[in-house]
Image: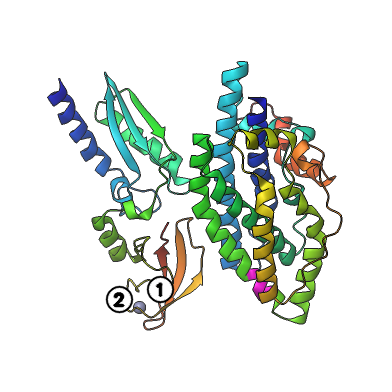
Amino acid sequence: MVVENNIIIEALWVLLEQVPDPEIPVLSILDLGIVRDVQMHGEQIEIIITPTYSGCPAMDAISMDIRLKLIENGFKDVKITSILSPAWTTDWMTQEGKIKLKKYGIAPPKMSGNSSDSSPVCPQCSSADTKLLSQFGSTACKALYQCNDCKEPFDYFKCH
Amino acid sequence: MDQLINYILHLADSNLILTQRNAAWCGHGPILEQDIAITNITLDLIGQSRNFYQYAAKLINETSGKEETEDSLAYLRTEREFKNLLLAEQENGDWAQTIARQFFYSLYQYFLYEKLQHSKDEQLAAIAAKSLKEVTYHVNWSSEWMIRLGDGTTESKERLTNAVATLWPYTGEMFLPANYESAMIAEGIAVDVIELKNDWIKKVTSFFEEATIALPENGFMQTGGKNGVHTEKLGYILSDLQYLQRTYPNATW
Ligand SMILES: [Zn+2]
């Protein structure tokens, strides 16, 4: 029974890998690091997630997408629990996620231990000579920068 | 338990009312980037207040058997039941007044949540720890604007000076605990706001120096918001905010 449960839980993680972030669809919700745990209580599946930002409007969409993905795959009884503590940090984003972000044209977040005054590297030309245009970008999680070399403006996924 | 619920509602209400004020800038900001900035800040504030309201609703329902939700608490309470700071309900005025209001509030929130994350109440501590990261950005943004406006042109300086003079009498209330707050301070749940005052004043003073504007004299301070006694402005805010639920009860999306 335990072995069987473990196989199902592994299958669930594979399914969750297929749920994209609605605002940055190249990232899965696992890349983002918001899925904290997957549990089975008899027939019921519980997915524990943590919000990125308190007011992130994508969280409702993400809960819905998780539910749909699991229902599509035969899991009828799905419970989604949102927990606040420990607070989400960009350090939980996977290395693979950071590579995907850069390819997509968004500068990935630095590790939170690093000094915050150094500018992010331009995702287009990899120049380190970039400047902040606005601390707030197109979504709650991003800031707007511009590259001083190739002159392209770009989004930076804020360290959080 | 009532005192804890009142304390949580106080935290939630200040955020909600400031959210409603700030949201009026959506589509009207001075330039696109700043329009986006103020609405992003507002999104954080509403998210934080939702966390507080959900927690308050849970406690109310557990103790009284009522069926409150985050929505019923926001849309169906009356003016005297709102416990927001008077500062939050003050008018947007010009951009300088909106900035000064945000700066005073964000800086207060920063010191408040820094302590609240160590509250004996685990849920309040979790909400505060999460919100603190967001508020840090709000302080950075609003303090930069304080400096830009104060140390800017003659006109921007004059506007900011007027804004500060208008809002200053509403800042004292932040550091005077209401009765329910004092009860929760004694239990190690609420933050003793009296202790925040020095840090807050010190930071305000240093930013004002950089912005080359004078700190107002410590004159008469307005109070009442925390206990539901508001300026006439709150009624107008609520009539907008609650219009839909009042006109079409139980309407849903
Ligand atoms: Zn570049």
- Label 1 beta carbon within 8 A of ligand 1: no
Indicate the secondary structure of the residue bearing disc 2.
loop
Look at mark 2 in the image and give the residue it sits on: A126
For ligand 1, tell me if the residue under mark 2 lies within 8 Å. yes
B115 inside magenta stretch:
no
Measuring from the top left, give residue B5's x and y in whole percent. Answer: 64, 30
Mark 1, residue position: A119
Q: Is residue B229 left or right of residue B174?
A: right
Per the rendered image, the range of residues in magenta is B145-149
Query: Do the residues indicated by labels 1 and 2 lie within the same chain of the protein?
Result: yes
Q: Residue flagged by tag 1: what amino acid is it?
A: Ser
Which amino acid type is shown beneath numbered disc 2? Answer: Ser
Measured from the top left, where is residue B23 in percent x and y?
A: 65, 52
Residue projecting furthest to the bottom: A149
Is A101 on the left-hand or right-hand side of B156? left
Task: Give yes or no for residue B147 being in the magenta stretch.
Answer: yes
Q: Residues within 10 Å of mark 1 (few under 14, many from 20)?
A: some
Q: On the rendered structure, is B99 left or right of B167?
A: left
Question: Which quadrant does ligand 1 occupy?
Answer: bottom left
Q: What label sits on residue B187 in the rendered view?
A: none
Q: Position of residue B25 (x, y in %)?
A: 67, 58
Residue A119, can we see it? yes
Q: On screen, B212 above or below A135?
A: below
